Image: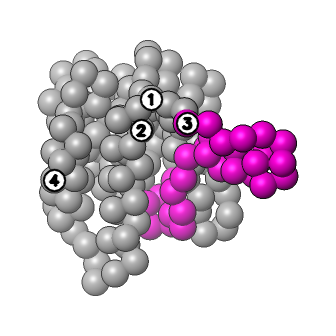
Amino acid sequence: MQKTVEFIEKRIKWKASQHNLPNKNVLLFENLTAEAKARYLTHFNENNSGKIILLFTDSKHNWTALGTKMIIGYDGTQFNSVKLSSIEDVDSKNWKELFSKAEAGESKIKKRNERELLVTDFDGKETAFITKEGSNFFSLWNIVLMITRLNEN
């Protein structure tokens, strides 16, 4: 069943509200001023990304935008994007690295404040998206995971 843009938007907003979003670092894109929207819209096309719903900010140099068709990020040096329909897995970049090292006996796993969401597409390409550490990271993870499950049905 093909999900409409409106349906996906409502689900993203509903899931965001369950995580007490928006907040000072996670913004509803529609509530930004025209000038603020323009700063981000110069980097991507909403025809490709879908309607941008949430903007996760870490600083002026790092941000992740979640649209109805795509997740887009800027890590201070380059732009990355992944179509939501092509996401196979969502993980924490640090956890994946720590688990690999722990399995090899190189280190012990320690609890960290996560901030990099690692998205793997069906071709195996991994892309990291940055957000503010802590609850904002886990909110993004949860929302992207929910969208991934929507696309499976």
Q: Amino acid at mark 2?
A: Phe
**How far apart, in angstroms, are the residues tagged by discs 3 and 4?**
29 Å
User: Considering only order in the chain, which callout, 1 or 3, is on the residue closer to the N terminus?
Assistant: 3
**How far apart, in angstroms, are the residues tagged by discs 1 and 4?**
21 Å
Number of residues whose C-alpha sits closer than 10 Å to that of mark 4, classed few (under 14), some (14–19) or many (20 or more): few
User: Considering only order in the chain, which callout, 3 or 2, is on the residue closer to the N terminus?
Assistant: 3
- Secondary structure of the residue carrying tag 1 is loop
Q: Residue at x 66, y 67 (%)?
A: 123
User: What residue did someone put label 2 on?
Assistant: 137
The image's mark for residue 133 is 1
Residue 135, given in percent of the width and then of the height, sits at: 35, 35
Number of residues whose C-alpha sits closer than 10 Å to that of mark 2, classed few (under 14), some (14–19) or many (20 or more): many
Q: Residue at x 63, y 24 (%)?
A: 77
Q: Amino acid at mark 4?
A: Trp
The magenta span reads: 82-111
The image's mark for residue 111 is 3
Residue 66, given in percent of the width and then of the height, sits at: 36, 45
**How far apart, in angstroms, are the residues tagged by discs 2 and 4?**
17 Å
* Pointers 2 and 1 in contact (C-beta within 8 Å): yes
Tell me, yes or no, whether the highlighted magenta stretch contains residue 7: no
**How far apart, in angstroms, are the residues tagged by discs 2 and 1?**
6 Å
Most foreground residue, 131 or 78: 131
Coloring scheme of the render?
A: one colour
